[in-house]
Amino acid sequence: MSFTSRIKNELVESELSKLEQLSELSGLLKNSIDSSSKLNITTENAAIARLIFNRLKNNYDALIRVSVKKGYNYNKNYIYGLEVYKNVDNIIKDLSLDSIVPNSYLIDDEDTKRAYVRGIFLACGSVNDPKTSQYHMEFSFDNEEYANFINDILDGYNLNSKILKRDSRYIVYIKESEKITDFLRIIKATNALLYYENIRIYRNRNNKINRINNCEQANVDKIIQSAKNQVDDINYIIKKDAYELLDEKVKEAADYRLKYPEESLNELSCIMTMETGTSITKSGLHHRFNKIKLLAQRLKSKDK
């Protein structure tokens, strides 16, 4: 079962007030009016089909013909159809299914607005499982004006939603993981929210550890390369019989570098301090190796 299906199955079990039920139903059935102004609803989710059937039956005494058929997509899921026959005009008017903006009583407070958005998600929303490579949530609409209306509602919750056109559809989407968890909190998908947060925190922690490891590895590589360059410079100076041009302190640093060719400057300064009994700092050691580098460069320049 997909993560989206798990969320929707959780939502249909929510306990709602009578008005919240109507608000949710309004969002859920928004795209269900066919060209002859009839209500024809299709869904691949059996729980959603039962929810719609019971809501219409209990609130509007609707007559509904139910059909089930095998789908033609690669999953070959069952498709549940509900065709409403009785009180259709009353349902359409009461739930504002024939207008862009629903009646004010359907979204005039926080509870009904959240229920309306929950219905929209049940109808056409989807969320990537947070275990996948990217965070993504979207709604798909066939009407640009209505897509803008839903986007404005989501903006009211500071979800940073955006709209794009994909073929003939208008997609309202959210990409930020924190905003997706905020949305799950808004629609009261508690179990999905906890799952999403746990996976998100785990992924963020692993990403942080990987960044630290990559940074540490880069530092190790830099230290090794720096030490190798110093060894190469010293060997070049020796090869050119110019070693005696270095003063005693610089020659001491060179001798220790050849003795400890892979140590960092900090580690080498500690070793020299312990073995010679004379304090030498990392910066002091760096200054000595700069002199070695300059001499090697001058020698190489003469060779050219």
Image (cartoon, rainbow, N blue to C red):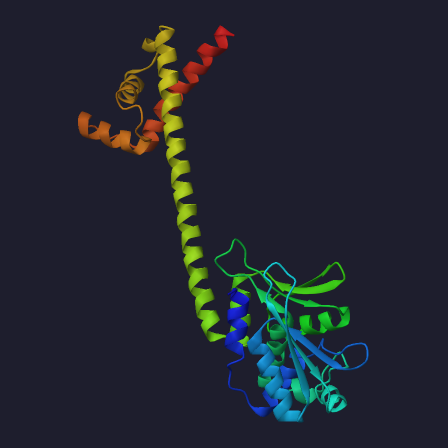
Foreground: 98 or 5? 5
User: Total label count?
Assistant: 0
- Residue at (68%, 70%) from the top-left corner? 151
Q: Is residue 109 above or below residue 302?
A: below
Residue lying at the far right of the rendered structure:
36
Foreground: 257 or 153? 153
Q: Is residue 291 above or below residue 110?
A: above
Residue 210 coordinates in the image, percent (x, y): 41, 47
- Residue at (67%, 86%) from the top-left corner? 64
Q: Is residue 95 above or below residue 255?
A: below
- Residue at (72%, 90%) from the top-left corner? 86
> Which quadrant holds residue 265?
top left
Residue 208 horizontal side relative to residue 136, left or right? left
Q: Is residue 188 visible?
A: no
Q: Is residue 69 visible?
A: yes
Q: Is residue 288 above or below residue 142?
A: above
> Which quadrant holds residue 35?
bottom right
Residue 256 horizontal side relative to residue 228, left or right? left
Residue 205 coordinates in the image, percent (x, y): 41, 55
Foreground: 223 or 165? 165
Residue 217 coordinates in the image, percent (x, y): 39, 38
- Residue at (27%, 18%) from the top-left corner? 255
> Which quadrant holds residue 103?
bottom right
